[in-house]
């Protein structure tokens, strides 16, 4: 293919064709090892593992670590409170 953009799989080091007009954040699959990779940079082409999507219904996503549950143990001092007028 003319003007084909090539890079290497970060899992198996096999040469991967990104085609002639890849897009940043595009998900591609390595035909050698089956890894799903994301294009994070175009010039030069750089691949990385895609970020996992968070599940908004996942209760643990919003859980506050227990050390932060007590205001006297906050890492940056007490929380400033808004005063009412």
Image (tube, rainbow, N blue to C red):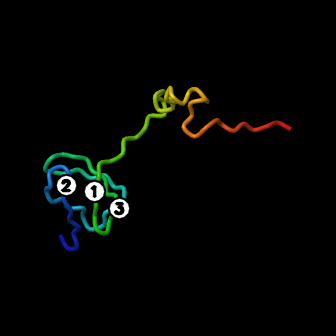
Marks 1 and 2, how far apart in space? 7 Å
- Tag 1–tag 2 contact (CB < 8 Å): yes
Q: Is residue 81 left or right of residue 26?
A: right
Residue in view at x 22 percent, y 73 percent: 3
Q: Nearer the viewer, residue 22 or 55?
A: 55
The N terminus sits in image quarter = bottom left
- How far across and down, in percent of the image, does residue 73 sit? 56, 30
Q: Nearer the viewer, residue 29 or 50?
A: 50
The mark nearer the N terminus, 3 or 2, is 2
Q: Which mark is residue 77?
A: none
- Is the residue 38 above or below the residue 58 in the image? below
Q: Is residue 17 left or right of residue 24?
A: left
- Tag 3–tag 2 contact (CB < 8 Å): no
- Is the residue 71 above or below the residue 46 in the image? above
Residue lying furthest bottom in this view?
A: 2
Q: Residues within 10 Å of mark 2 (few under 14, many from 20)?
A: many
The mark nearer the N terminus, 1 or 2, is 2
Residue in view at x 56 percent, y 27 percent: 69
Q: Nearer the viewer, residue 85 or 77?
A: 77
Please, what secondary structure does the residue beneath circle 1 have? strand
Marks 3 and 2, how far apart in space? 17 Å
- How far across and down, in percent of the image, does residue 55 sit? 44, 34
Please, what secondary structure does the residue beneath circle 2 have? loop
Q: Which mark is residue 9?
A: 2
Marks 1 and 3, how far apart in space? 12 Å
Residue that numbered label 3 is attached to? 23
Residue that numbered label 1 is attached to? 47
- Is the residue 55 above or below the residue 25 in the image? above
Residue in view at x 13 percent, y 50 percent: 32
């Amino acid at each position: 293919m003319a003007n084909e953009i090539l890079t290497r799989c970060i899992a198996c080091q096999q040469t991967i064709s990104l085609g002639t007009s890849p897009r940043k954040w595009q998900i591609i699959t390595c035909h050698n090892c089956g890894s799903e990779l994301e294009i994070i940079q175009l010039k030069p082409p750089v691949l990385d593992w895609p970020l996992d999507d968070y599940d908004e219904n996942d209760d643990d996503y919003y859980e506050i670590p227990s050390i932060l549950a007590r205001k006297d143990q906050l890492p940056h001092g007490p929380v400033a409170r808004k005063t009412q007028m």
